[in-house]
Image (spheres, rainbow, N blue to C red):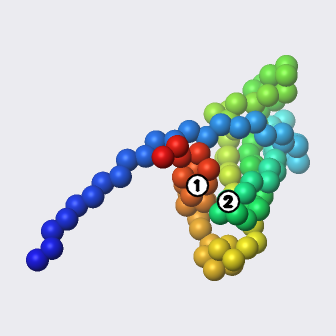
Amino acid sequence: GFKGSASVARDATMEWRLAVTVVDVQPNGNLVVEGRHTVTVDNQERVMVVTGIVRPLDVTTDNVVLSENVANASVRLIGDGPDTRTTERGVVGQIVHFIIDNLWPF
């Protein structure tokens, strides 16, 4: 018979600054924001779309908001290429794939 085992441990950090636009103001004054950034994953150009809700209190005098202060944050990769047409990954899969391909040092 065959007997085997394996384990993989990964730790990665992603940090970037992204300009966003206020796309709506909620009745309570909170800001609905959206930002787009083009990234290359697997030699295919994709658009990273970040959306969320921000309290005006959390916007600094430099117009910066930390990600921990963005409610209902969503990060999506949108693209069209051979891999994208063949297999659509979920959001978590896209983020993990992006980290491994672009930021993982090994």
Q: Residue at x 59, y 65 (%)?
A: 90
**Considering the image in quadrants, where does the N terminus appear?**
bottom left
2 or 1: tag closer to the N-terminus: 2
Q: Residue furthest bottom?
A: 86
Query: Which residue lies under the disc numbered 2?
Result: 41
Residue 25 in which image quadrant:
top right
Q: Residue at x 58, y 50 (%)?
A: 99
Q: Residue at x 60, y 60 (%)?
A: 94
Q: Is residue 97 left or right of residue 74?
A: left
Q: Is residue 6 left or right of residue 18?
A: left
Q: Could one spot residue 44 in this view of the protein?
A: yes
Query: Which residue lies under the disc numbered 1?
Result: 101
Residue 40 placement (x, y as % from top left): 72, 57
Viewer-nearest residue: 15 or 73:
15
Q: Could one spot residue 26 in this view of the protein?
A: no
Residue 51, compared with residue 46, is above or below; it is above
Q: Helix, strand, or loop for circle 2?
A: strand
**C-beta proximity under 8 Å, tags 2 and 1:** yes
Residue 38 in which image quadrant:
bottom right
Viewer-nearest residue: 53 or 68:
68
Residue 54 placement (x, y as % from top left): 76, 37
Q: Helix, strand, or loop for circle 1?
A: helix
Q: Amino acid at mark 1?
A: Asp
